[in-house]
Amino acid sequence: MPYLEYEMPTKEGIVIAESYNYNSEYIYRVSKYNEEAPNAHIIESIKNSLPLWTTRPTMETVKERFQNGSFVMYQYYKGELSGWFWLNSEFTHDWIETKPLPKPNSIYIGGMYKCLDQKLPADAAMDFGSYVMKYCCENYEYLYAIIETWNKASVRVFKDYQKFILKESFI
């Protein structure tokens, strides 16, 4: 599957991330611990909305993600949980098996899901992705991501960050 790889020095990325006009109806929260209730909510949404996804997250795989250093940012819309976004200080395709990133104090991001069984504003994915970028720029020196070209929401989020597309793979 074709994808784009990004390596972004966060001192440059913060300028882009801070220019986004964030919707105040969204609240974001980072969790480095396996919180069963919000994870179960999103897993159920994925199960109901994407039943053909054979490798979708389960409570067991989410537990493994946290055990291997992955953590999550939750999005809330008007106080209701509406999505998650995964992060890890190492590279990972599955949020479980990891390998070091090329530079210290780096973060790898991906795995965004907005609850497809909820009525959310059209800006839900863009606001979420932009907020994750801002969070990473404020807390790390480098940000890494892989965007699969079929993923239209992620392609839109990364549109302003195209100058950080790598010509050589970091994987």
Image (spheres, grey):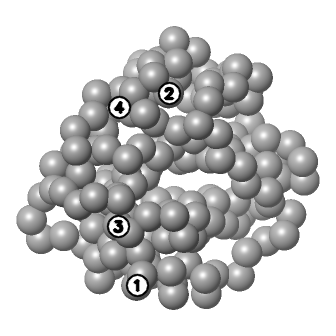
Decide: marks 4, 1 in contact (CB < 8 A)?
no
Could you tell me how far apart the alpha carbons at marks 4 and 1 are, in whole angstroms?
Answer: 28 Å
Q: Is residue 108 visible?
A: yes
**Which numbered marker is on residue 142?**
3
Identify the residue at horizontal 28%, vertical 44% (top origin). 91
Decide: marks 1, 2 in contact (CB < 8 A)?
no
Sequence-wise, which precedes: disc 3 or disc 2? 2
Name the amino acid type tagged 2: Phe
Query: Where residue 68 sits: x, y (%)?
Result: 39, 27
Sequence-wise, which precedes: disc 4 or disc 1? 1
Sequence-wise, which precedes: disc 2 or disc 4? 2
Please indicate whether residue 157 sits to the left or right of residue 143 in the image: right
**Residue at image mark 1:** 12
Name the amino acid type tagged 4: Asp
Could you tell me how far apart the alpha carbons at marks 3 and 1 are, in whole angstroms?
Answer: 10 Å
Please indicate whether residue 77 sits to the left or right of residue 55 in the image: right
Name the amino acid type tagged 3: Tyr
**Which numbered marker is on residue 66?**
2
Query: Where residue 135 sits: x, y (%)?
Result: 58, 64
| Residue 115 in the image: above or below residue 59 | below
Sequence-wise, which precedes: disc 3 or disc 1? 1
**Residue at image mark 4:** 94
| Along the viewing direction, whichever of 18 and 114 lies nearer the viewer | 18
Sequence-wise, which precedes: disc 3 or disc 4? 4
Identify the residue at horizontal 41%, vertical 44% (top origin). 88
Q: Is residue 120 visible?
A: no
Instruction: Choose mark 2 or mark 4, whichever is in front.
Output: 2
